[in-house]
Image (cartoon, grey):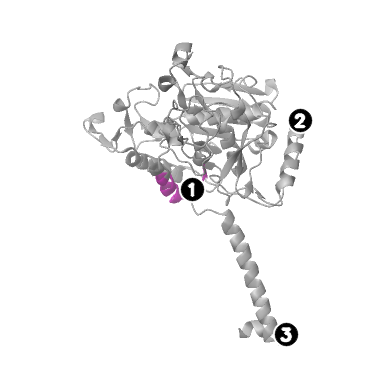
Amino acid sequence: MGVITKSPRGNLSFSIVVVLIFSFTFIVLLYTERINLLSSTTVFNSKSCVKRGYSKSTKNLIQDERNATEENRLKSILDDRFIFEAGECNTARGKWVYNQSFEPLYTDLSCPYLDRQVSCVKNGKPDSDYRRWEWQLDGCVLPRFDAKLALEKIRGKRVMFVGDSLQRGQWQSFVCLVEFLIPKDQKSMRRGRVHSVFTIKDHNATIEFYWAPYLIDSNTDVQIIGDPKKRILRVDSIEKHAKHWIGVDVLVYNTYVWWMTGTKIKSLWGSFANGEDGYEELDASVSYRIALKTWANWIDSNIDQNKTRVFFTTMSPTHQRSADWNNKGGMKCYNETKPIMKKGHWGTGSDKRIMSVVRSVIGKMKVPVTVVNITQLSEYRVDAHSSVYTEMLGRLLTDEQKADPMKFADCIHWCLPGVPDTWNQIFLASL
């Protein structure tokens, strides 16, 4: 204490020093408590929350109006919550709020790049209220998707979504969220079986999708094998896919639903003289861990973190069992019209073992990976799946098939516009 009580101007009284120390300590504790309330200790935190500031308005009239509305919305709630930016807000903590006045930036009629699989209203879905729910974070404000800001952030860059059909949905969502601002002669789409590219000429940018449902190599990557028991995964091999990821500026990965077949995974690694007959049958979480480590090792060995941002989207829940949300007479997600409101709901369509593997593997990587944690918020949205308003084997479901939702309802994929737009809200805020 001698150092504190000495002063060039003379000695401070003991009582003044005590008051100063007490005041300083109280301020520090108050600040720390505030931060702790906004923080979560898991690797799944998106970066978050600074007090002031938002994007500049755009030159486009429609976007100007949207930004002005958003600015007023943010100002009205800034006193209570922080604006999401990156780092401490937990995207899993929040609630879905219905907003009758909310209009998505696109529809399945206005955006020409949506697959029929996810174009629910266009396919005859009788209600569209699922589009008007907004994810409201506890303690933070998640800005609405700003298309002009998104285009500026990706100017001169390649953005690639890598993974399965759920990741393809997030890719299509991102494309549709920005494409309406781009003149027709400045945009183009090239669709491929494995690699698809949306090009924005005047921004020298691309938004791409690369099909790799397991991220690592398998015998079902291109020629889809319907029987999961016949699929074989080379869990230590990734180069066949990864060579296409070199030189990309923003990589957004996902892999989950293809692992959840309910059967053991035929996993192959190392050199076996008898080829594919040398596989081992492993539990899904064990095989997933080996595969994700293969992916992580490739990222750490090949990605320059000064040039490339890496994101990982957590698992997208399925809603195949209506008893999970206490609708025992229900038929999977069919005819569900509202989100589940029970806080912290977690159904059988999300595997916590997989979440644990993701947390463990990414937490040990050298290259920073931003986790876009979409699982909990999506768990509530039993109302927003394609259900029977979709296609199968390239054809829309017939009336006869629609009448049998227990067999034909798709409770894996999401209608667009819809829940994946919220995933991209978080992605853009983190970008």
- Residue 102, image x and y in percent? 68, 32
Which of labels 3 and 1 is toward the front? 3
Is 366 in the magenta?
A: yes
Circle 3 SS class: loop
Question: Badge 1: how crowded within 10 Å, few (<14), some, or many (20+)?
Answer: many
Question: Badge 2: how crowded within 10 Å, few (<14), some, or many (20+)?
Answer: few
- Residue 25, image x and y in percent? 62, 72
Q: Which mark is residue 367?
A: 1
Circle 1 SS class: loop
Does any portion of residue 364 appear in the rendered image? yes
N-term-proximal mark, 1 vs 2: 2
- Residue beneath disc 3: 8
For the residues marked 2 and 3, what is the alpha-carbon distance in whole angstroms?
Answer: 61 Å
Between residue 178 and residue 36, name the one nearer to us.
36
The amino acid type found where label 2 is placed reads: Asn
N-term-proximal mark, 2 vs 3: 3
Q: Are marks 3 and 1 in contact (CB under 8 Å)?
A: no
Q: Is residue 273 left or right of residue 339?
A: left
N-term-proximal mark, 3 vs 1: 3
- Residue beneath disc 2: 60
Q: Quadrant of the C terminus?
A: top right
Q: Quadrant of the N terminus?
A: bottom right
Write down the region rendered in magenta: 356-373
Is 91 in the magenta?
A: no
